[in-house]
């Protein structure tokens, strides 16, 4: 079984490729969070994978929340691994995953970093098409090695020191209290996709169906990147920036994302 979390498709792509060589079932953490589904029977699975993005050099808050609630029946000798997609560099994700899994008596056997296009456009911007293409090709080469290592169940050296941050803290945001930097500009068509995508269910419609952010946000940026009208902004950081979606994944149905 592979648990993956993906706002813009990078981790989903890696999870799908690894699933193809290991015959693993894929579980979307975003969907599981939306459904409140935390119990899984893995007795018949030979691999247990976690494929997630890097947030602030550690695990996304939503992933840590899911892992803490996760109840795996039938865990035994499964080869357990983590793959951390990132835009540039990872940090303590492996140690964080090791620590959380250890508290559940699950042993992390290996972990891998996978550099892919950076979706944190608050600080950066989407690379030009040629650069994007070469980044995706380079990621594919790294991923081939990861797939082979995982398929062969090769153990690796895992960072076991408890990290300072197990996860990037979530943010309490509110449109009404003006604490949300996320907002929809005049291009918003009230299509509702952002609300359907949000793994934390923290986007609600106003009277006209436009989104309001109220509650706990993990900052995955799925709403911002996947808005068909590019209407969702983060303060003044994103008006002139591109939007990113991994071109090699099939856009999933709105309610099966993340
Ligand atoms: C809130 C946030 C924080 C991020 N922090 C980092 C980071 O510390 N290091 C890094 O290399 N990439 C960082 N990124 C980039 C993502 O890890 C990267 O683009 C990832 O592949 C996105 O995965 P996805 O397409 O499956 O959502 C961050 C992205 C977000 C949204």
Image (spheres, rainbow, N blue to C red):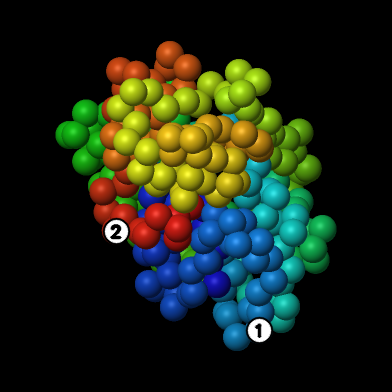
Name the front one of labels 1 and 2. Answer: 2
The residue carrying mark 1 is: 43
Q: Which residue sits at x=79%, y=63%? A: 104
- Mark 1 burial class by Cα count in 10 Å: few <14, some 14-19, many 20+: few
Q: Is residue 235 above or below residue 142?
A: above
Q: Nearer the viewer, residue 20 or 178?
A: 178
| Dot 1 and dot 2 residues touching (CB under 8 Å) | no
* Residue furthest to the top: 236
Residue 242: give x, y in percent of width and height: 29, 28
Q: Quick check: is the Cβ at mark 2 less than 8 Å away from ligand 1?
A: no
* Residue furthest to the front: 207
Residue 24: give x, y in percent of width and height: 48, 75
Residue 51: give x, y in percent of width and height: 52, 56
Q: Say what secondary structure mark 2 lies in.
A: loop
Q: Is residue 151 above or below residue 184?
A: below
* Residue furthest to the left: 130
Q: Say what secondary structure mark 1 lies in.
A: loop
Q: Which residue sits at x=34%, y=23%? A: 186
Q: Which residue sits at x=57%, y=79%? A: 46
Seen in the image, is 126 located left or right of residue 67? left
Q: Is residue 67 above or below residue 177?
A: below
In this orientation, does residue 55 appear? no
Q: CA distance from mark 1 to mark 2?
A: 30 Å
Comes first in the chain, label 1 or label 2: 1
Quadrant assignment for the N terminus: bottom right
Q: Which residue sits at x=61%, y=23%? A: 176
The residue carrying mark 2 is: 250
In this orientation, does residue 257 appear? yes
Q: Nearer the viewer, residue 243 or 123?
A: 243
Total marks placed? 2
Query: Looking at the rendered structure, which numbered label has been put on residue 122?
Result: none
């Amino acid at each position: 079984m592979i648990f993956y979390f993906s706002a813009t498709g990078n981790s989903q792509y890696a999870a799908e490729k690894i699933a193809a060589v290991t015959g693993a079932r894929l579980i979307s953490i975003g969907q599981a969070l939306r459904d409140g589904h935390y119990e899984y029977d893995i007795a018949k699975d030979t691999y247990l994978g976690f494929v997630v993005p890097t947030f602030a050099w550690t695990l996304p808050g939503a992933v840590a929340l899911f892992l803490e609630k996760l109840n795996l029946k039938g865990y035994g000798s499964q080869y357990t691994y983590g793959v951390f997609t990132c835009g540039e560099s990872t940090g303590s994700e492996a140690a964080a995953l090791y620590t959380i899994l250890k508290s559940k008596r699950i042993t992390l056997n290996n972990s891998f970093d996978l550099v892919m296009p950076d979706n944190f456009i608050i600080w950066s911007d989407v690379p030009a098409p040629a650069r994007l293409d070469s980044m995706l090709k380079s990621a594919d080469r790294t991923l081939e090695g990861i797939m082979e290592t995982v398929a062969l169940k090769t153990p690796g050296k895992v960072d076991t020191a408890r990290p300072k941050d197990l996860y990037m803290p979530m943010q309490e945001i509110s449109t009404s209290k003006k604490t949300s930097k996320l907002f929809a500009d005049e291009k918003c068509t009230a299509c509702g996709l952002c609300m359907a995508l949000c793994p934390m269910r923290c986007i609600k419609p106003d009277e006209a169906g436009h989104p309001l952010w109220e509650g706990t946000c993990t900052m995955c940026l799925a709403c911002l990147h996947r808005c068909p009208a590019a209407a969702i902004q983060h303060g003044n950081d994103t008006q002139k920036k591109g939007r990113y979606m991994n071109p090699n994944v099939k856009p999933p149905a709105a309610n099966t994302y993340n």
